[in-house]
Image: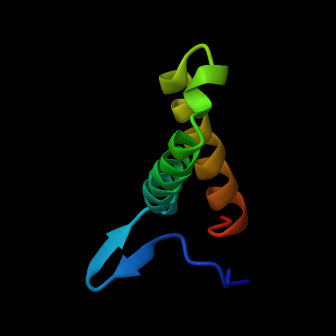
Amino acid sequence: MFSAIPKEIAIGDIYLPPLLVAGFLGVICTSLTTRLLNKLRWHRYVASPPLVELSMAIIYTVLIGTFVFPS
């Protein structure tokens, strides 16, 4: 009864927890999305842009952690 899904992600000889990798990718996706939305001047329609960026980072992290690195 071995699980085919690894519990850690190996990069070379360094083992990283999946949530750390998902969080890093979530922040990168948030940065790219924010840059795109800044070109569209999205900050005019939002009361608190930093709160929206934090929320996007959390949403991306949860989605990546759920669908890319399921545990």
Q: Residue furthest left?
A: 13
Residue 19 locus on image (x, y percent): 51, 55
- Residue 47: horizontal and vertical position, in percent? 60, 13
In the rendered structure, the answer to whether residue 30 lies left or right of residue 67 reads left
On screen, 5 above or below 49?
below
Q: Residue furthest front?
A: 40
Examine the rendered structure and indicate whether residue 6 appears above or below residue 36: below
The residue located at (39%, 80%) in the rendering is: 10
On screen, residue 24 above or below 12: above
- Judge from the rendering whether residue 58 lies leftward or rightward of residue 12; answer left or right: right
**In which quadrant of the rendered image does the C terminus lie?**
bottom right
Q: How many marks?
A: 0
Q: Quadrant of residue 52?
A: top right
Quadrant of the drawing holding the N terminus:
bottom right
Name the residue furthest top.
47
Which colour assignment does the render follow?
Answer: rainbow
Viewer-proximal residue, 51 or 38?
A: 38
Q: Viewed as shown, does residue 60 lie left or right of 51? A: right
Residue at the spot x=52%, y=53% of the render?
A: 26
> Residue 66 location, x and y as percent?
70, 59
Tell which of 63 and 29 is nearer to you. Answer: 29
Residue occupying image coordinates x 62% and y 58%: 65
Which residue is painted at 48% across and 60% down in the image? 25
